[in-house]
Amino acid sequence: MTELLPNYVHGTWVTGSGGGTGGGTPLTDPITGAELMRVSSAGLDLPRAFAHAREQGGAALRALSYGQRAEKLAAVARLLQANREAYHAIALANSGTTASDTAIDVDGGIYTLGQYARWGAKLGDARALLDGAAVPMSKDGVFQSQHLLVPTRGVALFINAFNFPSWGLWEKAAPALLAGVPVIVKPATATAWLTQRMVADVVASGLLPEGALSVICGSSAGLLDALQPFDVLSFTGSAQTAELIRSHPVVVRNSVRLNIEADSLNSALLMPGASDEAQALFVREVVREMTIKSGQKCTAIRRALVPQALYEAVGAAIAAKLAGITVGNPRDASVRMGALVNREQFEGVLAGIEQLATLPSMRLFFDGRRQPLVDADPAVSACLGPTLLGCDDPDGTAPVHRIEVFGPVATLMPYRDLAHAQALIARGEGSLVCSLYGDSTAEGSTALAAAATELAACHGRVHIVSPSVATTQTGHGNVMPQSLHGGPGRAGGGEELGGLRALGFYHRRAAVQADGAVVQALGAVPLVA
Ligand code: NAP
């Protein structure tokens, strides 16, 4: 029988009491279907786990300055870097990802930690932050109001999605720990192994104070019941689960602060009149976004919009590139695209393609369901080729703006003019990211800037690709710690990253009203994002 991964709670490694025959939920290899590990959170003393983190971990972290906590983040990043081969091996086995896809998760997580370590170091010896400048409130100017940010006195609970077991932990934990807030992470069951191993390595190293980092693998049952008023909850996952979390009675009763990163119908827009060069960049990016991590990225391009006259030609160009993508077992060096996370996800993606492809105005520019697999059994593995759909009538086909197929699937659609394109994009009802493809000329830049300003209202990020940044742009779907991650409406309404802006979620803002001398004595430093 495979190993039952222990959970780290109240300073102890505890295995769940199982449940079901054999105990726990199995994690599998998405290529072979083999069972790798099992997880269970059954029987854990969650109130004790949360109290330990809150009291012991929180107090120990708050005793340190931002600068000292930043040093600890840097040390954790170095530790993870030293162990990265083990993490790549776990990702290969449990996520079925190619080395470059694993790097986005593992190395992306380590990079993000390193960035927060560097930014945090600049906050030095302070233990609180200033939000803006002091404002006089009396005629003589002596009595003032200063907004102050202090770390919240609770825990940060992270409930994460399966697609980024490493990055999903560290992009949240870096700002939380820097802020002085202890972390309890509950990774998605399917890929919990990598998160658990990273936490185990950090705990074993003793680099963080006891109680600063805990991990609970398996069912989420009882986690939300353990939340108290000063705790915060950061969730990443589907809109469906997000809805359950938002309406959970304990969350509602205790006004638990929430950050929700949910699903999103992200789009890519080829600008009207764009040059052939910009068009080629568009085609390249759509193909990349469809195939990186087999399209299992919340930021992946789901809707690609082109001027009506280019619809056929661009569809054919993307299809030609997709035909050249080798799909299968990432242990084979020729494979460019690995697996979906498991057979359940595979079935879900097939059902999603079927649902969209059978709508009246839809067509298939490229059908990945027919793609041959390299070194993977189509009856067993979770490997699936990329599929490009076309929607001839994007105005009359509501499901293409609503259904997120969480795999290597995108829909190309034609637009009449820029206003039409922008209206179609807005039908996603709030997305994480939109990318624009245009030219680097003065006229092109002006048009791109105007479109970006228009589209910013319904996106967390607008990513602009033009020939001048063709080789330096960071990628439509790549979430960089320098920029905001999140989006309004359907995307969950959350905000993560964006440099030191991320600290805001883990701090409480209070106005201190006092004699200017008291304000001066606060000893806090400005939060400069
Ligand atoms: P999911 O099914 O919603 O699960 C997300 C997390 O919630 C998992 O840890 C899951 O645990 C947990 N969970 C399930 N039911 C719960 C409940 N009733 N109460 C509390 N927690 C619960 O999503 P997923 O399938 O892992 O991830 C795919 C989705 O995430 C996609 O829609 C994708 O767009 C979205 N996503 C968004 C972002 C973003 O940043 N916006 C990033 C990545 C993914 P179990 O695994 O144990 O069920």
Image (cartoon, grey):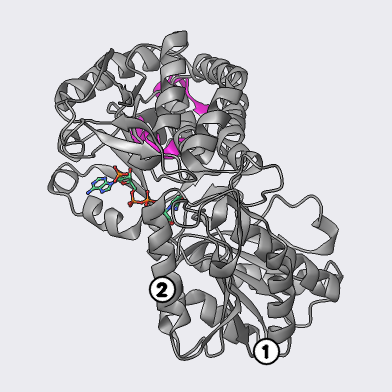
Q: Is residue 438 magenta?
A: no
Q: Position of residue 456 (x, y in %)?
A: 56, 65
Tally the numbered discs: 2
Quarter that holds the N terminus: top left
Instruction: Determine crowd level at label 1: few under 14, some 14-19, many 20+ residues with C-alpha closer than 10 A.
Output: some
In the picture, the disc for residue 52 is none
Q: Nearer the viewer, residue 181 or 356?
A: 356
Position of residue 185 relative to residue 281, above or below, is: above
The quadrant holding residue 14 is: top left
- The answer to whether 454 appears left or right of 24 in the picture is right
Measured as percent of width and height from the top left, residue 227 is found at 20, 35
**459 displayed left or right of 222:** right
Residue placed under numbered mark 1 in the picture = 308
- The residue type indicated by label 2 comes to Arg
Q: Position of residue 193 (x, y in %)?
A: 41, 31
Residue pointed to by mark 2:
402
Nearest to the observer: residue 508 or residue 339: 339
Q: Residue at x 29, y 43 (%)?
A: 257
Q: Which residues are magenta?
A: 503-525
CA separation in Å, label 2 and label 1: 22 Å
